[in-house]
Image: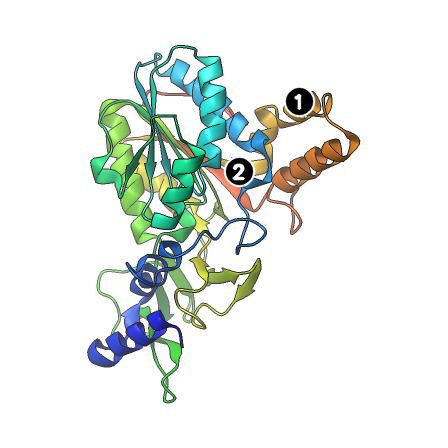
Amino acid sequence: MTPLAAEIAALIRQNGPIGIDRYMALCLGHPVHGYYRTRDPLGAQGDFTTAPEISQMFGELIGAWTAYVHGLMGRPDPLALIELGPGRGTLMADALRTLRAAAPGLRVAPHLVETSPVLRAVQERTLAGTGAHWHDGLESLPVGPAIILANEFFDCLPVLQFVRGPAGWHARQVGLDVQGGFTFGLAPEPTPGLDADGPEGALLSVPSAGLAVIRALAQRFRTAGGALLMLDYGHVRPGFGDTLQAMTRHGFTDPLAAPGEADLTHHVDFAALSKAAVSAGARAHGPVDQGEFLLSLGLRQRAERLKARATASQAAQIDAAVARLTDPGRTGMGSLFKVLAVSGPDLGPLPGFPDP
C-alpha cells in the first residue's frame, strides 16, 4: 500500500466513502504524496508523452496561432501569454520563440500556472531568461488582455460521477471493501437537483472543476479580451460511460491500485465546456480534431522546411512526428485529441477553426 493509499484509507474509515472528485484531487495534488507533486512524469522514462515533447513543430504552430490572434485583438502591448499545466515548459518555449519572431519588440510576459514543485524546477531551467512568472492558480494571474494555452490540462481536473438508479442519480464514490482495499460504490441516496435523462445503470461524468475554470476564463475574456486555446483528448457529443483512467509507464492500470503513483485522467467533455463558456458570455470556436487543426495551420509545410535541412534520419523522425500528431486511430493523436478555443464575444473567426 502506498503512503497516500494508507492516508486515504484512514480518511474513509473515519468519514465514510469519498467522491471521485476528492479521490482524483488527492491522488494528483496531495501536498506530500500527490502524483504531480513528486515527479516529472513526461517522456520515455516517465509515464506518458505529450505533443510538445514529440516535436518542436507543435509549439511553433501554437506560437504562430498566438501571433495571429494577438493581431485580431488589436496587438495589445504588453501581452500576457499564460499556460495552464505547462509540463516541462517546452510548449511555452517554442511558442514564445515563434511569437517574438513574428512580433519583434512586443512586450510579452509568460505566466505559468503550475502546482508541481518538480515540474516548476524543470520549467525554470527551460524558460531561463524569458522573464517568466509562476502561479499556483488563476487568482494571481495579471489582469488585462491575455492569450491562454492549455495542452492536456483539463483531462486532469477532478470530475464528479453519477450512476442512474431507479429513483435518480447516485454519486459514485471510492470506499473500502471487506479486505480493506479500495472499491467503487454509490451513495445510498440520489443527488438532489440532478435531472439529466439517461437509462438506469448509465454513468454520467460532470467536469465540475473544468466548468469552474472555463466560466472564470470566459468572464475574464468578456471584460478584458483575449482567448483560450485548449488541446486535449475527449469527446464532442454528450454521452454516458466511464472514461476515468490511470496511466503508468505508458500503459493503463487500475485507478484504485496505487494512489499517488499513477496519473489519473478522464476524457474531456468538450460539449459541456463549450456550452459553459457561451453561457458565461464568451464565444466558443470548435471543437475540431487536432489533426485537422494542425494541418490547417501549416504543419506539413513546416515539416517540409525542416526536412530540407535535415539528414535522412532526421527527416524520418519529422515524418513520424507529423504522423503521430495528426493520424487518426490508435496510432495517432489526430482524432482522439480535440481543439477548442474560447474568446471574448467579439473576437473571431480564429485560425484553425471553420467559420461558424
User: Which corner quadrant of the image does residue 134 belong to?
Assistant: top left
Q: Residues within 10 Å of mark 1 (few under 14, many from 20)?
A: few
Give the residue pinned by disc 1. Answer: 301
Say above or below: 129 vs 8. above
Q: Residue at x 40, y 14 (%)?
A: 71
Q: Farthest bottom residue?
A: 178
* Residue 213 shows in this picture: yes
Amino acid marked by disc 2: Pro
Residue 348, image x, y percentages? 41, 21
User: Which corner quadrant of the image does residue 160 belong to?
Assistant: bottom left
Residue 246 disc label? none
Q: Name the one closer to the observer, 218 or 183.
A: 183
Give the residue pinned by disc 2. Answer: 52
Marks 2,1: beta carbons within 8 A = no
Earlier in the chain: of badge 2 and badge 1, it is 2
Mark 2 and mark 1: Cα distance apart in space = 18 Å
Task: Label 2: state its secondary structure.
Answer: helix
Q: Residues within 10 Å of mark 2 (few under 14, many from 20)?
A: many
Q: Farthest right residue?
A: 312
Q: Name the one closer to the observer, 326 or 185.
A: 326
Q: Name the one closer to the observer, 129 or 43.
A: 129
